[in-house]
Image (cartoon, helix red, strand yellow):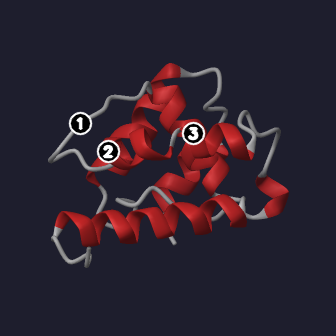
Amino acid sequence: MGCHELRQLLESDWRGNETTCSAITAHIQTCPQCRHGIVRLACDLLQDDPLSCEQCRQHFPAYYDATRPDYPLVEMTAKEMASVVYHLSHCDACREQYTVLVLLSELEERDEIAD
């Protein structure tokens, strides 16, 4: 899932480069394919992950809002956003939990959740 441009950005040295982090953030907010902020990277491309699963999950609510630029309720720094998308790119457990959060949030936004 995701597009080639986001993969290229994540494969670069984004951790120490605010410009690249900003490009990742802008791309996620504008690309129809990457709108949910989930991309998968090959294991051989992964380096040290800046986030633990617990840290990543703490960012989920803000990350969800930040990836919906039409309704920006929360702002994240570009580095925080890039760190979350990077972690989600290779952590199956966090990606699955985030996907469920997205689905439930979209149902709630459309007022389709039964009380």
Sequence-wise, the earlier of marks 3 and 1 is 3
Residue beneath disc 1: 73
Pinpoint residue 68: horizontal percent, then vertical percent. Answer: 26, 50
Q: Kindly identify the residue that appears in the image at 25 percent across and 66 percent down.
A: 108
Q: Amino acid at mark 2?
A: Asp
Q: CA distance from mark 1 to mark 2?
A: 6 Å
Q: Amino acid at mark 3?
A: Gln
Image quarter hosting the C terminus: bottom left
Image quadrant in which you'd find residue 32: bottom left
Q: Amino acid at mark 1?
A: Leu
The reply to whether the C-beta atoms of the residues labelled 3 and 2 are less than 8 Å apart is no
Tally the marks: 3
Q: Kindly identify the residue that appears in the image at 50 percent across and 21 percent down.
A: 18
- Position of residue 4 relative to residue 11, above or below, is below
Mark yes or no: residue 39 visible.
no
Image quadrant in which you'd find residue 40: bottom right
Report helix, strand or loop for mark 1: loop
The reply to whether the C-beta atoms of the residues labelled 1 and 2 are less than 8 Å apart is yes
Report helix, strand or loop for mark 2: helix
Pinpoint residue 41: horizontal percent, then vertical percent. Answer: 68, 61
Residue beneath disc 3: 58
Q: Kindly identify the residue that appears in the image at 72 percent across and 47 percent down.
A: 53
Drawn side of residue 18 relative to residue 65, left or right: right
Report helix, strand or loop for mark 3: helix
Badge 2 local density, few (<14 within 10 Å), some, or many (20+)? some
Q: Which mark is residue 31?
A: none
Foreground of the two, 106 or 7:
106
Pinpoint residue 81: horizontal percent, then vertical percent. Answer: 48, 37
Residue beneath disc 2: 65
The reply to whether the C-beta atoms of the residues labelled 3 and 1 are less than 8 Å apart is no
Sequence-wise, the earlier of marks 1 and 2 is 2
